[in-house]
Image (tube, rainbow, N blue to C red):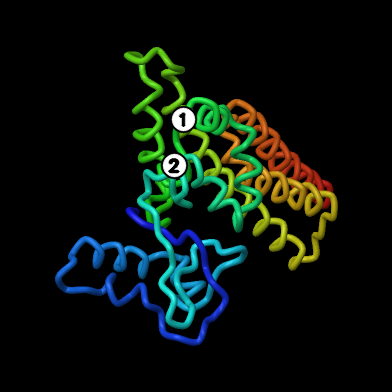
């Protein structure tokens, strides 16, 4: 993204002035930015005229006053590469808190190198990377040539795949337990174990932005163990009725 609001004044009853340029037929690149924004969740949930919390990703909504904008490589811009985490984190507080725990964040702040939110989610925040794409992005830096933790890419891909696999297994297990309860074989212990597994999986997925991959693998092992225990307990109950 080339430009972004430096400030959002208070008045909000005039139609959005940004669109006048960003829908322009003679400025194709600006029109592309606008199209990307229209495809984003931010546009869907916030619209053009509603500023998001604390300024967020809102755009101009004031009467007759043009906002100040800075080029993205100006340190005063909200989308200057080291400012991006703070901008996104004004709404995505949990993601920023976790990202601050990562070596990526420390390197970005201390050395000015490394990924920020835009690296994975694109300039208009329209993308969530697939596991294969995550591996590709990681290996740009983490590769044998650079000698910087070359196993990170495949491990990151595997963690995301495991999250999806574990979620599918958990959904199936909870369905099995519900089905047993409807047949008169309710097992509260199994239900509690699977509920705990669901909570742990949610926390694990939520902590992705720490990028502490080994720790995430260990937590997924714990989730899998809880699911297996729940199903074993249900099976013991079933066998006890035979």
Relative placement, left or right, of 182 versus 84 is right
Q: Residue at x 53, y 44 (%)?
A: 165
The residue nearer to you, when weighing 171 against 157, is: 157
221 left or right of 84 in image = right
Q: Quadrant of the N terminus?
A: bottom left
Secondary structure, mark 1, is: loop
Query: From mark 1 to mark 2, how far is it between C-alphas?
Result: 8 Å
Look at 43% across and 81% down and name the residue there: 64
Q: Dot 2, crowdedness within 10 Å: few (<14), some or many (≥20)? A: many
Relative to 6, residue 200 above or below: above
Q: Quadrant of residue 130?
A: top left
- On the image, the x and y values in percent for residue 37 come to 37, 65
Tell me whether the residue at label 1 lies in contact with that at label 2, contact meaning CB atoms closer than 8 angstroms: yes
In this rendered view, identify the residue nearer to me: 189 or 37: 37
At 61% from the left and 55% from the top, the residue drawn is 90
Q: Nearer the viewer, residue 16 or 121?
A: 16
Horizontal side of residue 91 vs 180, given as left or right: left
Mark 1 or 2 closer to N-term?
2
Q: Position of residue 9 (x, y in %)?
A: 54, 72
Q: In the orientation shown, which residue stands out farthest toward the bottom? A: 13
Question: Secondary structure under badge 2?
Answer: loop
What x and y, as percent, mark residue 49?
Answer: 48, 78
Q: Which residue is mark 2?
A: 81
Vertical side of 171 occupied by 54: above or below: below
List the residue tagged with mark 1. Answer: 112
Residue 126 visible (yes or no): no
Left or right: residue 78 versus residue 207 is left
Neighbour tally class for label 1: few under 14, some 14-19, many 20 plus, Cα within 10 Å: few
Residue at coordinates 38% horizontally, 50% vertically from top-left? 122
Mark on residue 213?
none
């Amino acid at each position: 993204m080339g430009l972004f609001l430096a400030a959002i004044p208070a008045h909000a009853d005039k139609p959005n002035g940004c669109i006048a340029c960003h829908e322009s037929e003679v400025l194709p690149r600006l029109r592309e930015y606008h199209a990307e924004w229209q495809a984003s969740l931010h546009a869907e949930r916030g619209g053009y005229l509603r500023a998001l919390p604390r300024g967020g990703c809102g755009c101009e909504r004031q009467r007759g006053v043009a906002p100040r904008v800075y080029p993205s490589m100006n340190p005063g811009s909200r989308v200057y590469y080291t400012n991006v985490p703070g901008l996104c984190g004004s709404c995505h507080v949990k993601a920023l808190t976790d990202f601050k725990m990562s070596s990526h964040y420390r390197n970005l702040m201390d050395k000015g190198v490394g990924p920020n939110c835009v690296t994975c989610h694109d300039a208009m925040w329209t993308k969530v990377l697939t596991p294969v794409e995550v591996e590709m992005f990681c290996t740009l830096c983490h590769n044998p040539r650079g000698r910087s933790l070359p196993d990170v890419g495949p491990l990151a891909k595997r963690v995301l795949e495991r999250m999806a696999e574990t979620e599918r297994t958990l959904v199936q297990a909870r369905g099995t337990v519900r089905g047993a309860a409807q047949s008169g074989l309710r097992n509260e212990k199994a239900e509690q174990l699977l509920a705990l597994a669901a909570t742990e999986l949610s926390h694990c997925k939520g902590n992705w932005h720490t990028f502490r991959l080994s720790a995430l693998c260990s937590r997924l092992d714990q989730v899998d163990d809880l699911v297996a225990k729940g199903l074993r307990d249900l099976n013991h109950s079933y066998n006890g009725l035979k």
